[in-house]
Image (cartoon, rainbow, N blue to C red):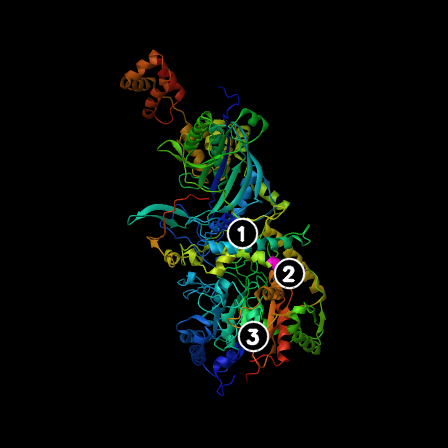
Amino acid sequence: MTNSRPLPNRLICGLEIHLELKTNSKMFCACKNDPFFAPKPNLHTCPVCLGMPGGLPVANRKAIEWTIQLGLALGCQINLFSKFDRKHYFYPDLPKGYQISQNELPLCYDGRLTTEEGVVEIERIHLEEDTGKLLHTQLDGEPVSLIDFNRSGVPLVEIVTRPMIVSSQQAVSFAKKLRRLIRYLEISDADMEQGSFRLEANLSLQTEAQARAGRLPDYKVELKNINSFRFLKEAIEFDLNRQKMLFERGEQPRQETRGWDSQRQATIAQREKGSVANYRYFADPDLAPLQFTESQLQAWQKALPPLPEVVVSHWQRDFSLKTHLSEQLIGTASRVNWLTSLFVATHEAGLEANKVASLLVNHQLKLETGSSLKKALTEIKRLLEVTSLPTAELSDLIASVLAAHSAEVARYQAGEKKLFGYLLGQLRPLLPAQVDMNQVRAQLERALA
Amino acid sequence: MKQSQVQAIAAMAQLPLSAAEAKVLSTQFKETLAVIAQLETAPTKGVAPTYQLTGEYNRWREDLVRPELSFNQAEALSNAPRAHQGYFVVPRILKSKP
Amino acid sequence: MSNSARQLNQFTFRQALDGLAEKKFTQAELVADLERAVKAQNQALNVFLSLAPNLSAESEAQAERPLRGLPLAVKDNISTRGLKTTAASTLLADFSPAFESTVTAKLKAAGATIQGKTNLDAWAHGSSTETSDYGRTLNPRNPAYLPGGSSGGSAAAVAANLALASLGTETGGSIRQPAAWCGLVGLKPSYGRCSRFGIVPMASSTDSPGLLTKTVEDAALLLGWMAGFDERDGTSLRTPSERWERQLGKPVAGLKVGWLYHDLEELNEVNEKIESVATQLRSLGIKVEPVPTGLDPRLAIAVYTLVQRAEVASNLARFDGLRYGRPRTTFGAEAKRRILLGTYALATRDRSEHNPYELAQEVRTLFIREFEQLFTQFDLVMSATSPSFAKKVGVSADSAMFGELEDMLLEPSCIAGLPGLSLPCYRDQETNLSLGLNLMAPAGREDLLFRVGEAYERNTPWNSWRNND
C-alpha cells in the first residue's frame, strides 16, 4: 500500500538564545554581577535577589540601554512604551516564585540577521532576570540539589527568532554571527561554557506543501542543553533524523523537550513537563513602566558603533584590507576603533594594511588595544623588513627538512601536492621571522621537483 | 466548576487541597467571575490602566555595585532550614523547569 | 486614665518627647512604666508577639537624637533586623530577618527604638486580628470586642497605653479601621510616601506603611521621620518628607470638605454621628457639603478584590520554605484561600480574552479621575471610617453585608493611593467604644489632613490623651 500523502521532511527551526549581560550589578538590585567566577556560592545576594519578604526590584538602566542597542543593531523596532511582567512558576532556583520578565511588550521586535545561508528574522528581544543555579549531588546518601543564588537576578536578554531556519548550517551560522555581534557590542562575554550564551532550538518537520504555504506544523520539539556550536549542529541533525524516522513509521513526533546528550550523541526526552504552563503574567506593580522618546532612540542609534559588516567594507574602501583578514581581526568595537587608528597610522607611513593585518592574524605582532601607535609602527616596520637568506644557507635548511621527512617527500612527488604546505610548515620555524616567503617557496619548489 | 479545574489551580499555586476545601473553593472561584463581570460593566473604553499610582515612568538605577546593600554568605543562609557548605539544600526535584 | 498616679506610658509621644527634653523624667523611667504596663496587660490582650531585649539601655543610648530613644511598637509584618518578623503566621515563626525595613531604619536613625512587634491578622489578611496564628487581640476599650484589623495589635498597643505610638500598614483599610475601633488616630499616608522596602508584601500597588497614634500631632511628627524617597523602592514618591507638625494650628476656615456616602441607608447609625461632625466642622468655618455618589462604590470593591487577590497570590509565591520559613503547606486557611482565589484570577481571561487584572487597573483609573474631579471642588472629602462600632468577639456577624460596606468606605481611597486620617468622633458611654471620622486628601496632601484633623481634635472632647497635662 502506498501512502500518497507526502511525509514531512523539511526542517523548520527557530532558535531561542539567552544572554547574560555583563553589567556591574544585577538586573533589579545592586549586588555584584559575577555568576561564573564567584569563588563561593551565595556571596552576592540581598533581600531582592534572594526573594526575601519585603525585597523590591529597581531596574538597572544600563541593562535596558544595552538591550535596546542590541535590538537596534539587529534592525529591530523598539517599543516606545514597555513594561516588566511577572512570570509565575515554582522551581527551587526561582526565589520569588516568579521571574520578572516581559510578556506582550518586549523592548525590541521584528529584527533580522543576515547569514551566509540567508536572512533569519528575529521575532522579539526582551529583558528579564536569571535564576539561581542548581547543583545535583548526594548528601549522606540522599539525592539533593544545592542552590546557589549568585546568578539569581543577573540581567538576561532573551532573543527569539521566527521559526524559519531550514538547516543546521544556517542555525550555526546565525548563532555564530549573533555571538560575534554581541561580543562586538561588548555587552556580554557570550561564553557558552560559562553559561552567558545559552542556546535552545525548536524544530519540527514540515511537508513541501506546508513550506510553500508558510504553514507551521502542529507540533515542535524543544532541544536544550546545547553548549557548543558543534552540539547545535549535531543535535539538530540527530533530531531531524529521529523525527524523519518516526514519520516514516507512521508516527507523529511528540511535542516535548529533549536534551542533547553528547556522550550518547543523541537527544533524550526530558521528564514530563505536564500540561502547558500557565504563567499568569501580569504587569509587575513594583516596577514603573518604561517610556522612551523618538529622540532618545535616535541618540541610541547614533551611539551604536559601526557594525562589523560596515567595518569590513570601510576597511576595504580605506585601506584595501582583504575581507578574510578583517573578519579575523574584528573582536570588540573598542578593538576595532583602535585598529582603525592603527591602519590610519600605517597607511600614512606608507605601509600596506594587509601586511600589518597578516602580522596580527598570525600572532607575529601582538598589540594591546590603546597601546602606543608610535611603538606599534616601529615594531611593524621592523617585522616587515624583508631580508633574503643567502641561497646556500636556505638550500641547506631545505635539504635537512626534506631528509627528515622523506616519506612525505615521496608522497608529494607521487602526486599529493597538498603536502607542500606541510613541508613548508616544517621549514618555517627554522627560518628567521623577517624572511621573504616568496623566495623560500620558490626554492622549496625547486628542491622538490 | 470541575474538581479537576480546581485542583489545577491548586497545583499552580503549589498548595494541597482536600476534596472538601476544593468544593468550597469552586463556589468562590465562581464569585471571582462575578467580580470580573462587574468590572466589565464599567465605562473603561479608551481608558488606560493605572500601572503605577505614582504616575511615574522609567524608575531605574545606575549600574553600580553596592556591597553595603548585599548580604554576606552567612546572612544569606541565616534563615535557611537546610544549608550545606554555603548552599541552600533541597531534596532532588525530578521534574524539569516549566 | 483612672489611676491617680501619672504613669509615663500614658503620655502621648509628643508629651514624652517634651518631658525628656525638659528632664522631667528619664528614658529608663519611661521604659520601666511601659514594661510594667505590658507585663500587666499583654497576656490578656495579646498585643505584642515579641518584645525587644535591652529596651532601656537602647533607649538611653539614643537620648541625644531627635526622637530621644522613645520606643515604638511595630506591626509584625515590618522587617526588623535581628527581631523576629512573623507576619503573625506560623510559617514565619522562626524568621529573623538579616535586614531592616526602610521605615524602621529611618525612625531608628532619628533616635527612636523598637519596643516590640505587634499582632495582626496573619499576612495582613483580615479586618479583625482574629485570624492571627497566634490568637486574637482584644480591644482595650472593651475586651469583649475586637480591635479591628489587620493592624489590630498596633491599635490595641496604643489604646491600652502599652506603647506611645505604633507603626501599621494599610492595604484596604488596615490602619484606619482598627484605629477607629480602638478610639485612636490612624494615618494612612499617600501611596509611596513611606517606603515599602522590608514590608511583607500584600497588595504591592496599595500597601502603605503608616501610623497609629494617640493624637494627630503625634502622627504628623512621626510621619516626618518615617517618610521620604527610598532608592530601594521603585514606587516611592520623590517628593521630600516634611515637618508636618508645622501644619498644626494653621487656619482652617474657608476649607471645603465633601461628605461621601451621606445618603446610604445602611450607614444611618453612623451617619447621625457624622452629621454632628459636619456641624462641628462648620462651626470652625469649614464648608461641609454632601456629595452625590458618582461611580458605583461597589466597583471600587471589585477593583480592590481583584487587584488584591492577584497581587497577594503572586507575592506569597516566594514562600516555598527553602530559604527561610516553614514549608508552604504551613499557610493557614485564610491565606490559602486568598492565594487560590488570586491564582484563579490571574489564570483566567475575561470574555474578551483580556487579563482581568489589567481590566481592574482600567477601572482603577476611573476612580482616580473621579477623586481628582472631586478635589477640584473640595479640599478634602470625608466619611465614616467604619459602618459601625467594633464587632464583638465570637459573634459571627452578617459578614457578607458588613464586609462590603466596610470596604466601600476605605477601599476607594486605598486604590487611588490617597492619604487618609481616621480620628475619634464619638464615644459610646456604655460600651466605651468609639466611632471614627475618615478624612481623605489629594495624593501628597497629608498637610491638609493634619491641619483639619488637629483642629477638629482640639475642639471636641473625643480624644482621650490631648489634655493629659
Q: Nearer the viewer, mark 1 or mark 3?
A: 1
Circle 3 Cα neighbour tier, 10 Å, few/some/many (<14 / 14–19 / ≥20): many
Chain ID at mark 1: C
Q: Among all residues in the image, which is located at the extreme bottom?
A: C4
Q: Residue at x 58, y 68 (%)?
A: C242
- Residue type of the residue flagged with mark 1: Tyr
**CB within 8 Å, label 1 to label 2:** no
User: Which mark identifies residue A164?
Assistant: none
The answer to whether mark 1 and mark 3 are in CB contact below 8 A is: no
Q: Find disc 2 in the rendering and name its residue.
A: C298
Element type where label 1 sits in the image: helix
Q: Nearer the viewer, mark 2 or mark 3?
A: 2
x and y percentages locating residue A156 in the rendered image: 48, 45
Q: Chain of mark 2?
A: C
Q: How many marks?
A: 3
- On whether residue C6 falls in the magenta region, the answer is no
Disc 3 residue type (three-letter): Leu
Q: Is residue A96 visible?
A: yes
How far apart are the two marked residues, 2 and 3, measured between alpha carbons?
A: 27 Å
Is A198 placed above or below C186 here?
above
Magenta segment, which residues? C296-303
What crowding class fits label 2: few (fewer than 14 Cα within 10 Å), some (14-19), or many (20 or more)? some
The residue that label 3 is drawn on is C184
- Residue C450 percent across, percent down from the top left: 61, 72
Whether residue C299 appears in magenta in the rendering, the answer is yes
- Provide the major secondary structure of the magenta segment: helix
In this view of the protein, which residue sits in the foreground, B57 or C375?
A: C375
User: Could you tell me how far apart the alpha carbons at marks 1 and 3 are, in whole angstroms?
Assistant: 38 Å
Question: On residue C344, which mark appears?
Answer: 1
